[in-house]
Image: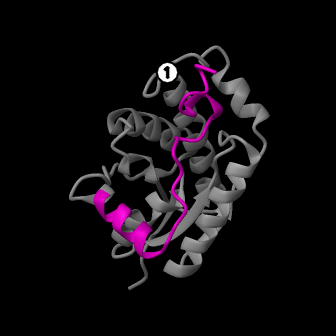
């Protein structure tokens, strides 16, 4: 029996490892690296290259979304000073998950989800609310799975070590870089 497809929004490769491992038992997983929020461009390149490596190693297709950050900056305008887990993060989720849902609809992929919920630093309830809205807007389904449960984050750390993956030290945008606000 053919599995249904799910488009997996990948915020970073280490998080994708355990999420893909969990999803592949039920779904045909297609990766989507859409993160125009990642700063600087060298960091974006490292994360994309690592995502490509994981896709190749684990055996899934990886599509790349836009790299243009101008629209993302416009989307979060006025929220630059918000703390982590605040309104800026919610707006960022909205921007990236809307693009993911749109891509899923355009490519007739019935479901989408995101690796964001594997992070202990992200609020799954906010991610799920934003994901549902994007799904409704684009006429696709959103899988509300809190991937950090059942040791998901711990498993992502283990797989990252086994695969010798680059792990970033901040979420991605310039406003989340530790110590940047203090400089």
Whether the magenta-drawn stretch holds residue 79 is answered as: no
- Pick whichever, 83 or 104, lies toward us: 83
Q: 60 left or right of 115?
A: right
| x and y percentages locating residue 74 in the rendered image | 73, 24
Question: x, y percentage for residue 154?
Answer: 29, 59
Element at label 1: helix
Quarter of the view holding residue 120: top left
Q: Residue sitting at 59 percent across and 21 percent down?
A: 181
Protein image colouring: one colour
Say whether residue 170 is magenta: yes
Percent across and percent down for residue 132 are: 43, 39
Which residue is pictured at 67% across the width and 65% down the height? 49
As drawn, the residue found furthest toward the left would be 150
Decide: few, some or many residues near mark 1? Use Cα within 10 Å; few <14, some 14-19, many ≥20: some
Residue under numbered circle 1: 87
The magenta span reads 154-183
| Residue nearer the viewer, 6 or 14 | 14
At x 56%, y 64%, the residue is 31
Screen quadrant of the C terminus: top right
Question: Which image quarter holds the N terminus?
Answer: bottom left
Q: Main secondary structure of the magenta part?
A: loop
Q: How many marks?
A: 1
Name the spot of residue 148 as percent of width and height, x first. Answer: 29, 52
Q: Residue furthest bottom?
A: 1
Judge from the rendering whether residue 58 lies leftward or rightward of residue 173; answer left or right. left
**Image height of 96 relative to 150, above or below:** above
> Quadrant of residue 92 in the image?
top right
Residue 168 higher or lower than 176, as above or below: below
Left or right, residue 99 beside residue 110: right
Outermost front residue: 183
């Amino acid at each position: 029996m053919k599995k249904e497809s799910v488009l997996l929004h990948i915020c970073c490769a280490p998080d994708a490892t355990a999420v893909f491992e969990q999803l592949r038992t039920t779904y045909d997983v297609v990766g989507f690296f859409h993160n125009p929020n990642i700063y600087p461009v060298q960091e974006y390149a490292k994360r994309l290259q690592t995502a490509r490596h994981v896709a190749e190693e684990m055996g899934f297709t990886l599509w790349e979304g836009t790299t243009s950050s101008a629209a993302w900056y416009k989307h979060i305008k006025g929220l630059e000073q918000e703390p982590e887990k605040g309104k800026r993060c919610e707006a960022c989720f909205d921007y990236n998950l809307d693009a993911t849902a749109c891509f899923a609809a355009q490519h007739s992929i019935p479901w989408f989800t995101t690796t964001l919920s594997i992070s202990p630093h992200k609020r799954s309830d906010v991610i799920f609310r934003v994901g549902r809205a994007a799904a409704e807007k684009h006429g696709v389904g959103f899988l509300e799975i809190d991937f950090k449960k059942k040791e998901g984050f711990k498993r992502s750390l283990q797989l990252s070590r086994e695969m010798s993956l680059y792990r970033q030290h901040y979420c991605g945008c310039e406003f989340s870089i530790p110590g940047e606000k203090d400089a």
